[in-house]
Amino acid sequence: MRPAGAGEAGRAERYIRAVPVTEVRSPAMQIGVVFPQTEIGPDVGAVRAYAERAEQLGFSHLLAYDHVLGADPAVHEGWNGPYDVQTTFHEPLVLFGYLAAVTRLELVTGIIILPQRQTALVAKQAAEVDLLTQGRFRLGIGLGWNRVEYEALGKDFATRGRRSDEQVELMRRLWTEPSVTFDGIDDKVTGAGLAPLPVQRPIPVWFGAQSPAAYRRAGRLGDGWFPQVQPGEKLDEARGIVEQAAVEAGRDPAAIGMEGRVTFAGDPGDVITRASAWEQAGASHLSVNTMRTGLVTVDQHLAALQQTAEALGLKPR
């Protein structure tokens, strides 16, 4: 794909004229961006420019992926993960502390690999981000897949699912109670608490999910979830599991949010079609990704976002 340019802008204009805004989205579905972690590089100016421009274009939130360490393929023979030791990742919660000062976008981890981190520390960091953003924060969590990373952080890969359940329970207590005593399998707190407490009590916890066990966990515990499948039969099946788990836990399935993801690869019309499919599937949120589409600079990523925002009828700020 060539970099975003005048030709693509022209195509965007044609799509805008062809598809009325009312057919693209309803006010109920919030549309944000996926921070281009692996391509934006270490330039702080580029990080700031990206977030500020995303807000100006009318996007509602910024979602960031998480990896603490990348594996070295020269050491780990046969490594075939999507990321390695050369792949750049800004640490999301530290990044959000910075972005909270320069933008009013909602900030979302999508996702933090929770079981490889210390529970109380994540609760504290999340509470601080929530304070700095004045409540514009969602903590997306997941189990991860990288055994190398778990080993380096001193956590057990095999028990990460069980640990995650316990961590969510403890974090919610730390976010809502001034003093907590908790005696779990992996975590123990005796008469201790966070100060200051977050704005949101508790902070919304969303789950990355791509297996029946993860769907059930999202339905049982989550304020929302991030499906890893596109609208269609597989999403319907996954959503059914989420909703059934919610009912069994005495929860209202309709109160659980769902965030889809679309990738802009040069065709605004395709983004419109996919966004509409997510809206029809009941998504409360949607994020637009521009990574791995041939873009090189932050300006190219932002040009792609501008075409997308115009095609989706977002209102500039």
Image (tube, grey):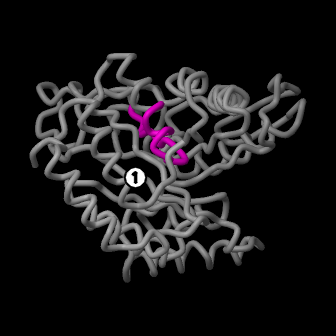
Task: Write down the quadrant of residue 53 in the picture.
Answer: top left
Where, quadrant-wise, is the C terminus in this rendering?
top right
Asked if residue 299 lies left or right of residue 153, the reply is left
Q: Where is residue 232 in the image (x, y as percent from the top left)?
A: 37, 80
Identify which residue is drawn at 82% across, 30% down.
Answer: 197
Magenta residue span = 52-67
Residue drawn 26% across and 58% down?
Answer: 12
Which element type, helix, strand or loop, lies under badge 1?
helix
Residue drawn at x 51%, y 52% is 315
Q: Is residue 195 left or right of residue 125?
A: right
Does 180 appear above or below 250?
above
Quarter location, residue 102: top right
Residue 140 image position (x, y, % from top left): 55, 46
The residue type indicated by label 1 comes to Ala
Q: Mark 1 points at which residue?
A: 309
Query: Residue placed at 67% from the left, 42% from the top?
Result: 185
- Please check the rendered image and state whether residue 161 is part of the magenta-colored stretch, yes or no: no
In this view, the residue in front, 41 or 127, is 41
Residue 227: percent from the left, percent from the top?
45, 63
Front residue of this view, candidates 188 and 201: 201
For residue 24, above or below residue 192: below
Query: Does the magenta-highlighted stretch encompass residue 65?
Result: yes
Q: Is residue 26 left or right of residue 250?
A: left
- The crowd level at tag 1 (other Cα within 10 Å; few <14, some 14-19, many 20+) is many
